Image: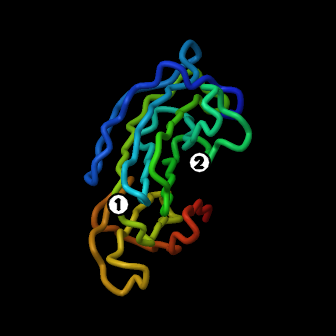
């Protein structure tokens, strides 16, 4: 589903903290889009959004309403994740300016409903993290690094599946603010 043209009226506010938070909800044929709003106050932040536990196909987008018209215009979708089926959706942006942002979750193709768990967090760092995906089962994981070099491991968050990760994993450094990895 395209996010362009969606309304940003009546969003649910998210309290952003440096620790990960979770909201559980769902979208359906009678509620096609859920909209959330959060504000970052740090001059530059890292923002992490995860859509997991999907009960059907759902898509994820991070939006900034640049002109304040409460409608998603073409240049206002900063990132989106539209994997098919129940594969987790992930957006991880670094160097995000202070301001108000919107998260939209929409019903994906070919389903009448999709339950989900939205994990979210932001912090005042602009470090580069690692996104990992296990191609054998689709599990996603993030390794938050202690600095841009990646030489020092800080913590690991497994988005879907087992912790610690087991099996063959492929990784990419999250550069230039966004990583969307299809293996």
The quarter in which the N terminus is drawn is: top right
Apparent side of residue 169 relative to residue 182 in the rendered image (left or right): left
Of residues 166 and 157, the one nearer the viewer is 157
Q: Separation of disc 2 and disc 1 at Cα?
A: 23 Å
In this orientation, does residue 83 appear? no
Of residues 74 and 53, the one nearer the viewer is 74
Quadrant for residue 23, please give it. Answer: top left
Q: Residue at x 37, y 55 (%)?
A: 42
Q: Nearer the observer, disc 2 or disc 1? A: 1
Above or below residue 157? Residue 36 is above
Q: Position of residue 183 (x, y in %)?
A: 61, 65
* Contact (Cβ within 8 Å) of mark 2 with mark 1: no
Above or below residue 51? Residue 147 is below
- Dot 1 surroundings within 10 Å: few (below 14), some, or many (20 or more)? many
- Dot 2 surroundings within 10 Å: few (below 14), some, or many (20 or more)? many
Q: Residue at x 39, y 47 (%)?
A: 40
Q: Position of residue 105 (x, y in %)?
A: 53, 33
Quadrant for residue 9, please give it. Answer: top right
Q: Residue at x 50, y 37 (%)?
A: 103
Above or below residue 15? Residue 155 is below
Q: Which label sits on residue 124?
A: 1
**Labels 2 and 1: the sequence-earlier one:** 2
Q: Which label sits on residue 81?
A: 2
Please, which residue is most extreme toward the right here? 74
SS of the residue at dot 2? strand
Q: Residue at x 60, y 25 (%)?
A: 70
């Amino acid at each position: 589903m395209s996010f362009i043209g969606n309304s940003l009226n009546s969003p649910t506010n998210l309290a952003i903290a440096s620790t990960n938070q979770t909201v559980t909800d769902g979208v359906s044929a009678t509620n096609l889009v859920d909209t959330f709003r959060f504000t970052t106050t740090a001059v530059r932040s890292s923002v992490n959004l995860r859509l997991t536990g999907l009960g059907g196909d759902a898509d994820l987008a991070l939006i900034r309403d640049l002109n304040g018209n409460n409608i998603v215009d073409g240049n206002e979708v900063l990132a989106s994740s539209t994997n098919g089926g129940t594969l987790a959706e992930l957006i991880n942006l670094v160097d995000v300016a202070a301001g108000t942002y919107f998260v939209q979750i929409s019903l994906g193709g070919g389903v009448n409903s999709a339950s989900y768990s939205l994990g979210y967090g932001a912090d005042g760092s602009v470090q580069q993290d690692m996104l990992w995906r296990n191609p054998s089962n689709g599990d996603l994981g993030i390794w938050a690094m202690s600095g841009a070099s990646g030489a020092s491991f800080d913590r690991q968050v497994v988005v879907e599946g087992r912790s610690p990760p087991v099996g063959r994993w492929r990784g990419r450094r999250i550069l230039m603010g966004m990583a969307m990895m299809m293996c």
